[in-house]
Image (spheres, helix red, strand yellow):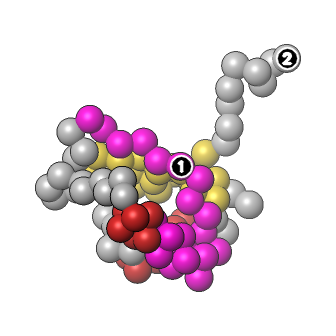
Amino acid sequence: MPRYLVERTFAGRLDLLSDAAGARVCAAMVEINAVQGVTWVHSYVTPDRARMVCVYDAPSPEAVRCAALANGQPVDRISEVRVLDPYFFH
């Protein structure tokens, strides 16, 4: 399955809930993603919570974009990526 890097910019500050309500929001997003065959791997958020970079496994960029739309998430750019880490050469 291809892996994608998704860049997002939020109009305001992203609300990050670290309680039961936040867990429910994340679980709902995972369910919505699954409809498109999209798996959320992890995300990185800037300290000002204005930008986010997310990693997804998905069948296509279109599936990622459809899942984002269904979740009410902005999408600035979707790029297919491959893993390269310092252990690659060992």
Label 2: element kind: loop
Q: Tell me which label, 1 or 2, sits earlier in the chain.
A: 1
- Identified by mark 2, the residue type is His
Residue 23 at what x, y percent from top left? 44, 64
Compared to residue 33, the image places residue 55 above or below, namely: above
Residue 77 at what x, y percent from top left? 40, 55
User: Which residue is found at the position 35% from the left and 42% from the top?
Assistant: 45
Residue 78 at what x, y percent from top left? 47, 56
Classify 10 Å Cα crowding around label 2: few (below 14), some (14-19), many (20 and above).
few
Which residue has dot 1 on it?
Answer: 42
- Identified by mark 1, the residue type is His
Which residue has dot 2 on it?
Answer: 90
User: Residue 32 bears which disc, if any?
Assistant: none
Question: Which stretch is magenta?
Answer: 26-47
**Picture quadrant where residue 48 is located:** top left
User: Which residue is found at the position 76% from the left and 21% from the top?
Assistant: 87
